[in-house]
Image (spheres, rainbow, N blue to C red):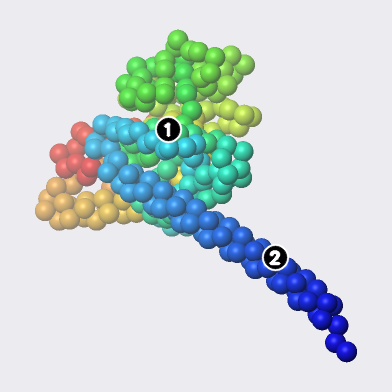
Amino acid sequence: MVNKKGEFGFVWIFAIFAGIAILLLMVYMTSKILDTSKKLSDTEIGKSLSIVLDPLSAQDLRSQLTKISFSSPTKVEVGCVNKGYGRSLLTVLTRSEGKTGEWTGGEDIVVADKYIFSDVTEGSKNLNVFSTSFKYPYKIADLTFIVSKDYCFIGAPTKVKNTYSVLNNLQFDNCSEDQITVCFDTPLSSCEISVEGFCSDYLCDSEYDYGFVKKEGNIIPFTDSLLLAAILSEGSEYNCNVNRLMYRASKIAGILLKKNEFSSSRGCRSGVAGPLAVLETGFLDYDPYGFITDTETILSLNELNEMGSCKLW
């Protein structure tokens, strides 16, 4: 005789386990859908950020600033790929579950034509995005800075104040405790970051036209508007973008040489063709420490171009 009671119990046990399995599967699928949705959302934010950066190109020597706000604390990771012209990578990260959840991000957004320097290491609701041009000796590109922290420059020269005064999270001299202090020619023990200038040529706007930024045990060479880049960014990110910039500078030198050939064929000769040929090869695989030895020569080359009857830039 068949035991109906045992058969009934087995059916219920099977149904319970099957129900649990289905429930777990539904929870798993829901979490995967939520993860996918969050990743898509973070990727979309990253794409929107890259679009916001597009109009931020500094015209001539003027600088531009915009402010980006998020509804919740957000990290923006900036990567750099150094191969030829290279590219920047933007990744937006948000917390998966409120304030204590794990930081997760969307897909990398490739930004091929930007040179981005950032200090964003923690979540922030507000980012200041600043752009200014980089010249060495001719304009090479616009630099983009993503700034989330508050800084105070102590003893900065007039040129530095004029260039960076538009940043609303940067203050000069009257510092508060919550600001990162940056001292100009003051011992590093007095500040978190120090800047040492070396420019002594009569063509210098200030001694800080080139020099070193010292922070966290690192010494980072800079020139022109790369001063802020050296202050904000980490060494690997900085060196990668410098190599990209100088590769571009080499290609621009080649274009200017062709422009010189065209001008010369019409009787208008320039005295900078020889130095430009040197830059075309010398700027490839450029070591940032070259800024310390080369900048005064670059300033002289720019002056020579300005004095010529046929200016190449």
Q: Position of residue 312 (x, y in %)?
A: 22, 44
Front-lying residue, 266 or 122? 122
- The residue most toward the bottom is 1
Q: Mark 1: which secondary structure?
A: strand
Is 26 situated above or below 72?
Answer: below
As displayed, is residue 147 above or below residue 260? above
157 and 272: which one is in front? 157
Q: Is residue 304 visible?
A: no
Vertically, is 131 above or below 283? above
Q: Tell me the amino acid under the disc marked 2.
A: Ile
Relative side of 255 to 42, left or right = left
Q: Which residue is mark 1?
A: 126
Q: Residue at x 66, y 63 (%)?
A: 24
**Circle 2 SS class:** helix
Q: Position of residue 252 (x, y in %)?
A: 31, 51
Quarter of the image containing the C terminus?
A: top left
Inter-mark Cα distance, 1 to 2: 44 Å
Tag 2 residue: 20
**Furthest-top residue in view?**
174
Mark 1 near mark 2, Cβ–Cβ under 8 Å?
no
Q: Earlier in the sequence, mark 1 or mark 2?
A: 2
Residue visible at 83% across and 77% down in the picture: 5
Q: Does residue 31 lie above or below 237 as drawn?
A: below
Which residue is painted at 42% across and 55% down in the image? 110
Q: Position of residue 166 (x, y in %)?
A: 32, 24
